[in-house]
């Protein structure tokens, strides 16, 4: 036997065997078992897997193999999020078609994942760039369109005037074009949207069902949806018929509104400055704000600049004429894109008013001090008692909010309203490599949906990747572009925008339940059997957009009768990043560790074991070359233990006549089995592996050196039992070496045909535990007591202790508090 385990031979051997046995392919004949749908977020086929992938998929693989051994009916599929901008960038740079670039990358990455030994059901593999898949993106679009949930409107895009092309958000770097460095402008064009806002309340309420999601992710989604109960107040433009609606949750401060602020993107911004002396200056200011909006928002540089439009509005509660400004701290994405400014009670308004010397009026008085508008060092944003608010003066804010809201509705100057921060999902992309939007434009009939019988609308393969004036190259393909109108038969043309790639990933988990269906996006019977996903695993960077969009589309398909479950993911794990030299691994930082290098030097099992042992999944993982070597040494230690022990072939028999050391080992074995199983269920992989390491150390405590100075274990059944259990416990973490060691130990079937080991409860309990005895919360003694005693036994044993008797002398026990396994506290008072 080799002294160092031959990982290359072993890993190749077992990967071939798993494939030949279709070991991880789900079989319908196992429907009698409890189902378990495990899914990691599928990757973009960028060319090669990185350590972030290795971590994500190693976490999932442990759970997959554990659930197989726990006799679950497992579904664990893999696919490719294959559309997207990087493929087009590669096409331009490498002069290769995006489809070919993507196919090559998928082939390479698939082999890398197989080299890692991940337990995927490859029979369900999907690629979102396959017409058999994206035809159903188009089908979903048509169903949303039928329900009024897919629509067009004018919206801003990033425009490079030098390249004369539309840029994706990822191509805007610091407000400049990534190619030529020109300042990027915002350009208004017509785009398609999904009306996710119609599901805002449903999405918000659904978070309450997700007890298996991290609280931080639910909070992020809740904040993104942003439900607010307030009042939409109508400010009429002075000497005009138009009204500016403003949403606020602080209607109690309305009497303190001294000016109005619009977003640069507000529809009235340009109209209000038209024909005025400041028009040219204001236009330049508005255009600059639009260009810099993204950079300012990302850097949180808001609230610094503004310009007066020259127009006024009427505050409807007191008929005061107040100036209308345009400022950078109001965004069109929030509320109505207009804000009533109350500088005494909003810090942004306060700073802006101070800068531009705008009027301020106190309307909420701090009950603990006397505030004056002219001497306030900052805005008072808490609640208090209303002042300078006519008949509402004297009311507390909480009461005033309700009364002011009802009064406004009665006077028809406002309306109680629920507002959401969540805006509709813009799905139009002026790119080639994506799902074509199934709409045809006819001069007579307008926008006409492609008939379902004509799906999929496929991308033309022969294409010239030139973006002329921001128009997709699809417009240059006459065979694709021109088509008869499905309604009237006249000459028409196709939509040339393609869909956002988030559409692809918004329902792929459902396709996996019935991946090869040609007649529908999935079978409702299959989806209803497998859904929801029992455990979803992915990076926290997808905590908002992907998960929100997936929940939205799933709910829509549920409303359409295709799937019963309302929430797609029961449990969610968001793993941390892989860090090296203090920064996230990335090519730009030059700190990338190639998984292939680790596999070549140490094997896939070592890579997996290190990445699972180095840190809990939710935390960032600091890469350590020494840690990798340490994992390799441990696997070799176990390898030698299995190969050179004299106990591996000892016949099983009832364990008897054990020495104290062997009894201790027997107890340690059962405690380890319990801990590893519980830790896997909780994703505490690092402590599970540590427990196996401790058990290995305990076995070596029985060893002795022979003449050749090799470690030899006595021929005892307890040792043989421990060795088998170690291999079983280690198998989800290091499956290749575990398979080989199981075979060495005489296992006829593969290790993953075995059941997860059980433990004897009698070995789990410690014989005695140390119990703290407190009197009125102060520690007065400690007492040894048998494990799992009754409360009466705890009380009786504690009261018999001499020190306790001393402290209880002349005291009356009025209450006894017992924390099982930890302490007993006697609450006493003087007297008996």
Image: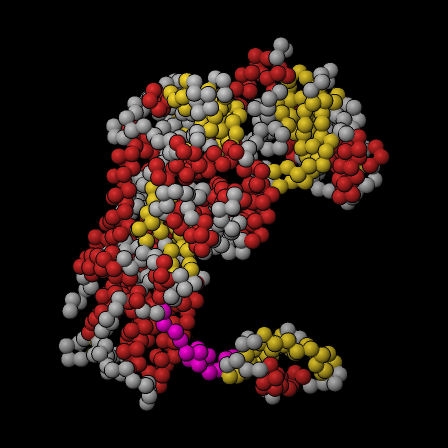
Which residue occupies 55% across, 19% down? 285
- Where is 781 relative to 28, above or below? below
- Where is 444 relative to 56, above or below? above
Q: Is 543 a magenta residue?
A: no
Find residue 203 and report its image quarter: top right
Where's residue 122, x and y in %?
30, 51
Which residue occupies 58% across, 52% down? 208
- Residue extending farthest bottom: 657
- Where is 71 relative to 562, above or below? below
**The N terminus sits in image quarter:** bottom left
The span picked out in magenta is: 756-770
- Residue extending farthest front: 488
Which residue occupies 27% across, 47% down? 110
Q: Is 765 a magenta residue?
A: yes
Q: Total number of numbered labels?
A: 0
Q: Depth check: give the residue in front, 774 or 94.
A: 94
Where's residue 331, x and y in %?
58, 29
Q: Is residue 204 visible?
A: yes
Find residue 312 and report its image quarter: top right
Which residue occupies 22% across, 69% down? 743
Where's residue 566, x and y in %?
53, 49
Where's residue 162, x and y in %?
39, 18
Drawn side of residue 720 relative to residue 303, left or right: left
Drawn side of residue 827 relative to residue 182, left or right: right
Colouring style: secondary structure
- Residue extending farthest right: 391
Q: Is residue 323 visible?
A: no
Q: Depth check: give the residue in front, 347 or 571.
A: 571
- Where is 210 relative to 452, above or below? below
**The C terminus sits in image quarter:** bottom right
């Amino acid at each position: 036997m080799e002294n160092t385990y031959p990982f290359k031979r072993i890993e190749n051997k077992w990967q071939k065997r798993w494939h030949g046995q279709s070991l991880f392919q789900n079989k319908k004949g196992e429907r009698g078992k409890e189902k378990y749908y495990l899914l990691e977020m599928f990757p973009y086929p960028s060319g090669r897997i990185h350590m972030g992938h290795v971590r994500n998929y190693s976490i999932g693989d442990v759970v997959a193999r554990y659930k197989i051994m726990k006799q679950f009916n497992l579904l664990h599929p893999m696919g490719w999020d294959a559309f997207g901008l990087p493929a087009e960038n590669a096409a331009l740079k490498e002069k290769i078609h995006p489809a070919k670039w993507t196919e090559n990358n998928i082939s390479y990455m698939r082999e890398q994942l197989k080299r890692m030994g991940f337990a995927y059901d490859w029979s369900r593999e999907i690629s979102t760039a396959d017409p058999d898949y994206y035809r159903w993106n188009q089908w979903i679009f048509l169903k949303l369109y039928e329900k009024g949930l897919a629509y067009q409107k004018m919206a801003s895009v990033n425009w490079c005037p030098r390249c004369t092309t539309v840029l994706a958000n990822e191509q805007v770097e610091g407000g400049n074009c990534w190619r030529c460095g020109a300042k990027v402008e915002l350009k208004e064009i017509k785009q398609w949207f999904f009306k996710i806002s119609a599901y805002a309340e449903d999405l918000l309420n659904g978070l309450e069902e997700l007890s298996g999601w991290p609280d931080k992710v639910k909070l992020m989604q809740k904040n993104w949806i942003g439900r607010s109960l307030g009042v939409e107040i109508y400010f009429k433009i002075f000497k005009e018929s138009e009204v500016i609606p403003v949403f606020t949750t602080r209607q109690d401060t309305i009497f303190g509104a001294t000016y109005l602020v619009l977003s640069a993107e507000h529809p009235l911004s340009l109209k209000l400055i038209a024909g005025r002396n400041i028009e040219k200056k204001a236009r330049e200011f508005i255009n600059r704000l639009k260009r810099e909006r993204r950079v300012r928002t990302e850097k949180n540089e808001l609230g610094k600049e503004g310009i007066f439009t020259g127009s006024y509005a009427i505050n409807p509660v007191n008929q005061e004429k107040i100036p209308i400004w345009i400022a950078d701290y109001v965004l069109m994405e929030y509320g109505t894109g207009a804000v009533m400014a109350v500088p005494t009670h909003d810090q942004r308004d306060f700073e802006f008013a101070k800068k531009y010397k705008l009027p301020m009026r106190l309307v909420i008085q701090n009950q603990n001090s006397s505030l004056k508008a002219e001497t306030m060092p900052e805005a008072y944003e808490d609640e208090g008692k209303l002042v300078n608010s006519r008949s509402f003066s004297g009311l507390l804010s909480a009461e005033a909010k309700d009364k002011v809201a009802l009064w406004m509705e009665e006077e028809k100057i406002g309306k109680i309203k629920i507002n959401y921060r969540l805006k509709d999902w813009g799905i139009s992309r002026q790119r080639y490599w994506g799902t074509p939007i199934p709409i045809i434009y006819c001069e007579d009939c307008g926008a006409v949906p492609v008939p379902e019988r004509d799906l999929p609308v496929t991308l033309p393969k022969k294409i010239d990747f030139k973006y002329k004036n921001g128009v997709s190259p699809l417009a240059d393909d006459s065979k694709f572009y021109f088509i008869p109108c499905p309604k009237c038969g006249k000459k028409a043309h196709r939509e040339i925008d393609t869909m956002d790639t988030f559409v692809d990933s918004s329902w792929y988990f459902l396709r996996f339940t019935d991946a090869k269906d040609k007649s529908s996006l999935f079978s409702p019977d299959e989806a209803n059997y497998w859904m929801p996903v029992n455990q979803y695993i992915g990076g926290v960077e997808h905590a908002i957009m992907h998960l929100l969009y997936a929940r939205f589309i799933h709910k829509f398909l549920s409303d359409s009768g295709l799937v019963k479950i309302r929430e797609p993911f029961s449990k969610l794990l968001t793993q941390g990043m892989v860090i090296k030299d203090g920064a996230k691994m990335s090519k730009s930082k030059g700190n990338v560790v190639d998984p292939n290098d680790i596999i070549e030097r140490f094997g896939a099992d070592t890579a997996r074991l290190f990445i699972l042992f180095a840190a809990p999944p939710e935390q960032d993982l600091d890469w350590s070359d020494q840690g990798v070597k340490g994992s390799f040494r441990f696997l070799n230690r176990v390898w030698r233990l299995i190969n050179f022990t004299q106990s591996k072939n000892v016949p099983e028999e009832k364990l008897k006549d054990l020495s104290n050391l062997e009894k201790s080992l027997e107890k340690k074995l059962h405690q380890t089995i319990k801990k590893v199983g519980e830790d896997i269920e909780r994703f505490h992989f690092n402590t599970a592996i540590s427990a196996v390491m401790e058990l290995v150390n305990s076995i070596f405590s029985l060893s002795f050196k022979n003449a050749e100075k090799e470690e030899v274990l006595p021929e005892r059944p307890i040792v043989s039992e421990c060795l088998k259990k170690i291999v079983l416990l280690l198998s989800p973490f290091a499956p290749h070496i575990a398979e080989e060691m199981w075979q060495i130990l005489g296992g006829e079937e593969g290790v993953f045909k075995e059941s997860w080991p059980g433990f004897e409860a009698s070995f789990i309990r410690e014989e005695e535990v140390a119990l703290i005895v407190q009197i009125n919360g102060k520690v007065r003694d400690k007492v040894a007591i048998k494990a799992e005693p009754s409360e009466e036994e705890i009380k009786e044993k504690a009261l018999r202790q001499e020190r306790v008797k001393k402290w209880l002398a002349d005291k009356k026990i009025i209450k006894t508090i017992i924390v099982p396994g930890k302490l007993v506290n006697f609450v006493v008072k003087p007297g008996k």
